[in-house]
Image (spheres, coloured by chain):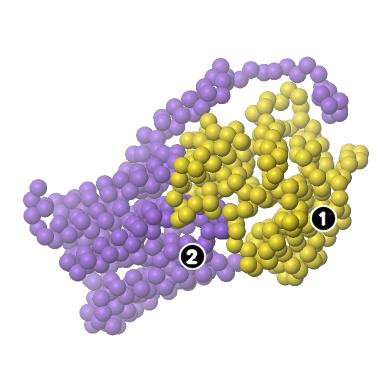
Amino acid sequence: MDEPVVDLRGATASLGSRPVLRGVDLTVHRGEVVALLGANGSGKSTAVRSVIGQVPLTGGALSLFGTEFRRFRDWARIGYVPQRTTAAGGVPATVREVVSSGRLARTKLGVLRKADRAAVHRALELVGMADRARDSVNALSGGQHQRVLIARALAGEPELLIMDEPMAGVDLASQEVLASAVREQVAGGVTVLLVLHELGALEPLIDRAVVLRDGCVVHDGPPPEAVGQHALPGHDHVHPHADAAAEPMRTGLLT
Amino acid sequence: MDILNYAFMQRALLAALIVGVTAPAIGIYLVQRRQALMGDGIGHVALTGVGLGFLLNFSPVWVATAVAIAGSLAMELIRWYGKTRGDLALAMLFYGGMAGGVMLMNLSDAGSNANLSTYLFGSISTVSAQDMTMIYVLAALVLLITIGLRRQLFAVCQDEEFARVTGLPVRLLNLLIAITAAVTVTVAMRVVGLLLVSALMVIPVATAQQISRSFAVTFVVSIAVGVAVTLTGTATSYYVDVPSGATIVLFAIALFVLSTVLAAPLARRRAKAAAGAAGSAKGCTLEVPGSRTPADDVSV
């Protein structure tokens, strides 16, 4: 019953010849919200990408929903939000078209039925992009791109939501929308594993933080408290008069 | 319409129509994953198949199809495994295919330089009844895949990593795209020629992009553009004595330029509408900050 949703044990992985994970243990239980924190190059992104099989493990064991990774096929239970590069491809696509591809895991042969269209619409409403459904993703701001990518993951109604730096380069208005979308998912019993550079707007939601340094876990427990100016959950100093649509101004150093 | 009275022109127009539909239908996925020139590479490799067909005295079109499929699979494998010098490996494949084709053609008795140029640049009026059977079969396959699997192919070409995590058989779908592209190249070979095939995969898509915001509309418009230029190009080559392949490609480029010119005011109107919706139609006003201290009392 209380099987962990993600169970990564003694994981090692390398990118090229450089070892990036050096024995990482990471367990996420049902309903938990776990944040992976750490500096650039600490291996947090690699850890989360190895959980979804995008970085092969060179050692250790991984199981998802109690199934050994090699036998795991139930991808519809996982919603993945990649680190944002862009939601756009080489051909124009609307917001709805991109979000619909997140529903494929739940469809048979890729046919979208009425229930599937409804799920796509719900996901768009959750991130406040329903009114932009027919717009091209090329016309969106960075924060809106990120909202689209999260809606794409939510369209499949996942039990486990995995997000890689969902708040990177996202304007304040979008951060709040995203935080409330995640809050709603968590209230519905969804398990969340996310990579964060700073706790930011998601801070109140996080049950547990796992901090990585040089490919090793150095902290696994309650989210670290902010200590002084260089505390891990670095603060974004956003000017109060900054327009909601504008990118947040950063004071530098911390980001 | 005396053009329709000749059997060879009926075949030519039908072949042109089919190429006008199939080339953009697979081309849109290549453009979407930013591999617009893959068709060009396959065309080069297919030439070796044509040469081999002449040498073995076996249907050059079928051998070309087989070799093009092998070449496109090789390109796909290089994309997976060749991390560092993938572009160089592709270059080897392109020019090796070209040189191999010219060499094999020269070694065979039937293959002459005149024959070579019909494959390189197309010779639509020489499409035979047998060629047509093959074109029907292969075109049906291409349409079945590009339309039937459009959602899966869209997902893979839009974001490959996400598609893998969705549980889609990404490798299989990528191989399918490669094979479909190879088949399309050999279907289009007689109409526009191996060197110009890629143009029909890419230019109609580029034209459609100028005026559309969605993948679905781009798909439909690019096929419409493809059909329009192949049919008018073929008809023109009948009335005026000009090569069909070059005429088709030049028409396609002309349409692209035209759509670019027409799209500029359209984009301006859309931008205006978007600005109006955002409530900033009145333009920019300078806000004077009341205080240098932000609300959270951390001075900056």
Chain identifier of the residue bearing label 2 in the image = B
Chain A shade: yellow
Q: Residues within 10 Å of mark 2 (few under 14, many from 20)?
A: few
Q: Position of residue A7 (x, y in %)?
A: 75, 60
Q: Which mark is residue B281?
A: none
| Residue linked to disc 2 | B172
Chain identifier of the residue bearing label 1 in the image = A
At x 68%, y 37%, the residue is A184
Q: Residue furthest front?
A: A1
Label 1 SS: strand
In the image, taking residue B225 as reference, residue A49 lies left or right, namely right
Near-viewer residue (B156 or B114): B156
Q: Position of residue A127 (x, y in %)?
A: 61, 36
**How far is mark 1 from mark 2, CA to CA?**
36 Å
User: In the figure, residue B224 lies in which quadrant?
Assistant: top left
Near-viewer residue (B90 or A154): A154
Q: Residue furthest right?
A: A228
Say above or below: A69 vs A144: below
Chain B shade: purple
At x 51%, y 36%, the residue is A133
Would residue A113 be seen by someone viewing this image from the given angle? yes
- Which residue type carries mark 2? Leu
At x 57%, y 44%, the residue is A155
In the image, taking residue B70 as reference, residue B51 lies left or right, namely left
In the image, taking residue A172 as reference, residue B121 lies left or right, namely left
Q: Residues within 10 Å of mark 1 (few under 14, many from 20)?
A: many
Q: Position of residue B239 (x, y in %)?
A: 14, 51
At x 31%, y 46%, the residue is B225
| Residue linked to disc 1 | A212
User: In the figure, residue B162 lies in which quadrant?
Assistant: bottom right
